[in-house]
C-alpha cells in the first residue's frame, strides 16, 4: 500500500528532541513513524501524541541492532510503501568527565555503536525506500562537539569522535547520493533534555522547530551541509 501523505521517521523519538520532532512533523501534515528501542516507552509516547489527534505510528528500532533496523525497514515498506524524511536523532552521551586514555574503552565502543554505526546502518537500510520514489530528506542530528575545533580541547572524547565521524559520514554519503535525495547534519544547540540537563537554554520545542526546515527543502536545497538553525556552520 502506498501512503498518500509524506512519511517521516524519527529514531529515538520517545523523548527529548526526537519526541518534539515527531510532534512537530505530525503537526505539519506528515505521517510520522516514531521509533524507539523500548516498546513500552515508545507506545506510551505515541499514545500521548495520537491523543492530541496527531498521525503518529510506532515501530521498535534499536539502532545498535542491525536486525532490528532491517526489520523496521521491511515493516515500513510493507505498511507505507514510502519514506520521505529520515531523522537520525537517537544518541548517547556517556563520557561526561572522562578522558579517552583512562575511560573504560567500552564507553567509546558503545558511543560509536549508537551515534555513528547506528546512523550508518539506518541510512543503508532506508535509502532503498527513498530511491524507489527518487525523493528523500535525511537529517543527521550531530553536535557542535563534533566540530573539528573541538578535537584540540580535552573532554567527552568518545562523544566528540562519534559526532565528528557522523559529520564525515554526512559529507561522504552526500557525494554518493543520486537524484533528489538530500542529506545534511545539524547542531540542535544545547537543549534541556535528559541529555542536555535542566540548565540548557534551548527547549526541545525550540530546537525541533529550528531543524524542521531541512525536512522540506526543495531540489535546490543544501546537500552535505552542517547547520545550526538555518545558518551553515564549520565542520
Ligand atoms: N541535548 C543537547 O543539548 C544536545 C546537544 C547536541 C546534540 N544533541 C543530540 O541530539 C540528539 C537527541 O538528544 P536528546 O538531548 O534528545 O537526548 P535524550 O533526551 O537523552 O534522548 C536520547 C534518545 O535516543 C534514544 N536512544 C539511545 N540509544 C538508542 C538506541 N540504541 N536505539 C534507539 N534509540 C536510542 C533514547 O532512547 P531511550 O529512551 O530508550 O534511552 C532517547 O529516545 C542526540 O543525537 C544528541 O547527541 C543533543
Image (spheres, helix red, strand yellow):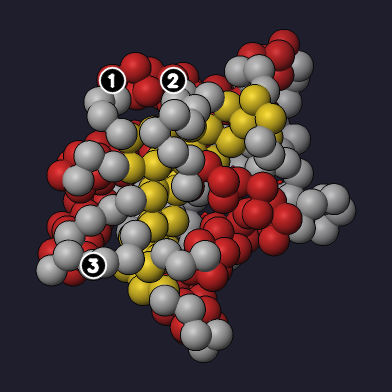
Marker disc for residue 171:
2
At a point 32% along the width and 35% down the height, the residue shown is 181
**Horizontal side, residue 209 vs residue 78: left or right:** right
Q: Earlier in the sequence, mark 1 or mark 2?
A: 2
**Placement of 14 over or under 123, stated as above or below:** below
Residue bearing mark 1 = 176
- Give neighbour class at mark 1: few <14, some 14-19, many 20+ (Cα, 10 Å): few
Q: Quote the CA–CA distance across marks 1 and 2.
A: 9 Å
Can you tell which quarter of the image residue 232 is in?
top right
Marker disc for residue 166:
none
**Horizontal side, residue 133 vs residue 234: left or right:** left
Q: Are marks 3 and 1 in contact (CB under 8 Å)?
A: no
**Horizontal side, residue 129 vs residue 194: left or right:** left
Can you tell which quarter of the image residue 71 is in?
bottom left
Q: Quote the CA–CA distance across marks 3 and 1.
A: 27 Å
Q: Earlier in the sequence, mark 3 or mark 1?
A: 3
Amino acid at each position: 500500500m502506498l501512503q498518500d501523505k509524506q512519511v517521516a521517521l524519527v529514531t529515538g523519538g520517545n523523548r527529548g528532541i526526537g519526541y518534539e520532532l515527531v510532534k512537530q512533523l505530525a503537526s505539519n501534515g506528515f505521517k510520522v513513524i516514531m521509533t524507539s528501542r523500548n516498546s513500552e516507552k515508545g507506545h506510551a509516547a505515541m499514545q500521548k501524541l495520537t491523543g492530541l489527534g496527531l498521525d503518529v505510528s510506532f515501530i521498535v528500532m534499536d539502532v545498535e541492532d542491525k536486525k532490528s533496523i532491517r526489520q523496521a525497514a521491511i515493516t515500513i515498506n510493507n505498511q507505507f510503501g514510502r519514506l520521505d524524511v529520515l531523522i537520525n536523532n537517537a544518541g548517547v552521551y556517556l563520557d561526561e568527565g572522562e578522558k579517552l586514555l583512562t575511560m573504560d574503552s567500552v564507553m567509546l565502543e558503545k558511543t560509536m555503536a549508537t551515534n555513528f554505526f547506528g546512523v550508518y546502518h539506518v541510512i543503508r537500510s532506508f535509502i532503498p525506500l527513498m530511491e524507489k520514489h527518487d525523493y528523500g530528506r535525511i537529517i543527521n542530528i550531530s553536535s557542535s562537539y563534533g566540530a573539528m575545533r573541538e578535537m584540540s580541547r580535552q573532554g567527552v572524547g568518545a562523544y566528540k569522535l562519534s559526532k565528528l565521524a557522523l559529520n564525515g559520514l554526512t559529507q561522504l554519503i552526500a557525494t554518493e547520493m543520486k537524484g533528489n535525495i538530500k542529506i545534511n547534519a545539524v547542531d540542535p544547540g544545547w537543549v534541556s533534555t535528559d541529555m542536555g540537563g535542566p540548565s540548557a537554554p534551548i527547549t526541545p520545542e525550540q530546537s525541533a522547530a529550528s531543524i524542521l526546515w531541512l525536512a522540506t527543502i526543495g531540489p535546490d536545497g543544501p546537500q552535505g551541509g552542517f547547520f545550526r538553525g538555518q545558518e551553515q556552520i564549520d565542520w
